[in-house]
Amino acid sequence: MQSRKLPIVALVGRANVGKSSLFNALIERREAIVARESGTTRDSISSKATFLGQQFWVVDTAGVKDPEDDFEQSIQDQIFQASQSADIILVVVEADVPASTEDRQVATLALKSQKPVILVVNKIDKANHDDIFSFARLGISNIISTSVTQSYGIHELLKEIVKNIDKVPIKNEPERLKIALLGRPNVGKSSLFNTLLNKQQALVAERAGTTRDINRAIVRFKNQEIELMDTAGIRRSGKIEQGVEKFSVLRSLAAIEESDICLLLIDANEPNTAQDQKIAGLIKDAGKGLALVVSKWDILHEQENFDYDGFIKRISADYEFVDWAPLIVTSSISGQNATKLFDLVMRIKHARETIISTPELNNWLVRTVREHPPAGMKNHTPKLNYIVQETDNETPSFKIFGSHTRFVHWSYRRYLERRLREQFDFFGNPIQLWLIEKRSARSAASKVNLTRIGK
């Protein structure tokens, strides 16, 4: 089968060359912290971007440190991870600063990756435009000058990114269900990985990686080949160590995109962390199947007067934004519920592949709208006419066509998704729901008015 993961674009370069500002310009919103001090970005920040109908991930990496901060190792690790996990590499330099030794090393290592490389000469407003030709000696032929403050060159850079996305090879892979184990360091991913292998006797193959890469193993369960991927842990901001751990978010993001279903491990002793919720959000945004797996359950369960029901309710409340994801408790020591995880992912896979006929969907829409019609504004009352399922999307996705759809309130959108889940089985999967203006649907694709509901 063909891999359909979204391409990943990584920004690399020295500290304080404007990567975070460029990142915000590419995704068209302010997410990365921008400051005059160098080294503000301590770990990798990622977000989806869309240009000319093409979606891709943008990853803003921490800046390369100076020599006394183990500079050489930092460069090697940064470009290594970019070349392994990203599909396109943007090497960012400052227009008003001559190319340095660090810039040359970054450029050389980026070119060795054999991935498409674009040299972005940033802050061009502070230099002469002719100065960009001096950066040609870095060996990168594709050079684009930009200025975030002047909004110069951003559109051209996005066009070049999309142009190079077409060059990203589509991998032909066997029909295999890919499961990624994700979570913070020391949460028990590797232990669960090994437990799942020991529980499953029909081992087809094993392919070990390193601490910098993804450990993989292929097992068979009920005639289904499953590839397990054990990823490096994602640390919270401010806890990223020097070296390879800086880029764990980029590696894990690549694993999410490669996978079909993700198992998010949550430490039973520390169940409510913003970092775990951030990972769950990445999985949801990527449209992947998800199960919440509480690890180290044996330690917590042995406590006297432990309130099981209260514990489960607290976790459910913390992850209400992915309330469609099943929750299961495990112990790698005792092997509790380890085998049940295979049954769980197979159920998620089955729900993920569910195709609902158009007549059945439209019968559901008529009943749903009749019971609770959408409210409007003044003379603009939304009308929802018909619904179809996108059969070429790996994530359960639906389009509802109607009139005045832009006036549909977000609470009604949530109502539609809830009723859709009540009627059909999308266990463990996000839903992508779109409202499309009928008049726009008849016009050119560039004029289509789309409103996305949920993920």
Image: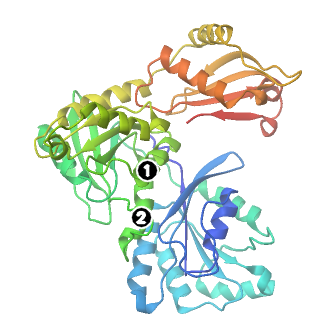
Q: Residue 388's x, y, as percent? A: 63, 20
Circle 1 sits on which residue? 279
Residue 205, given in percent of the width and then of the height, sits at: 19, 47
Label 2 to label 1: alpha-carbon separation = 20 Å
Q: Which of marks 2 and 1 is in front?
A: 1
Graded by Cα atoms within 10 Å as few (under 14), some (14 to 19) or many (20 or more), the crowding at tag 1 reads: many
- Depth check, front residue: 190 or 307: 307
Q: What residue is pinned by disc 2?
A: 84
Picture quadrant of residue 211: bottom left
- Quarter of the image with the N terminus in it: top left
> Element type at marker 2?
helix
In the rendered image, which quarter is residue 370 located in?
top right
Residue at (52, 62) in percent of width and height: 45
Res. 1 in view: no
Q: Give how far across and how far down residue 286 sits, in percent.
A: 50, 44
Q: In this rendered view, identify the residue nearer to me: 112 or 434.
A: 434
Q: Determine whether, in the image, residue 105 is placed left or right of residue 224.
A: right
Crowding at label 2, few (<14), some or many (≥20) Cα neighbours within 10 Å? some
Identify which residue is drawn at 41% across, 79% down.
Answer: 76
Residue at 49% across, 16% down: 422
Q: Quarter holding the C terminus? A: top right
Q: Quadrant of residue 331?
A: top left
Which comes sooner in the sequence, label 2 or label 1?
A: 2
Question: Mark 2: which amino acid?
Answer: Gln
In this image, 78 relative to 133: left or right?
A: left
Q: What amino acid type should be assigned to the residue bearing mark 1?
A: Ile
71 shown above or below 299:
below
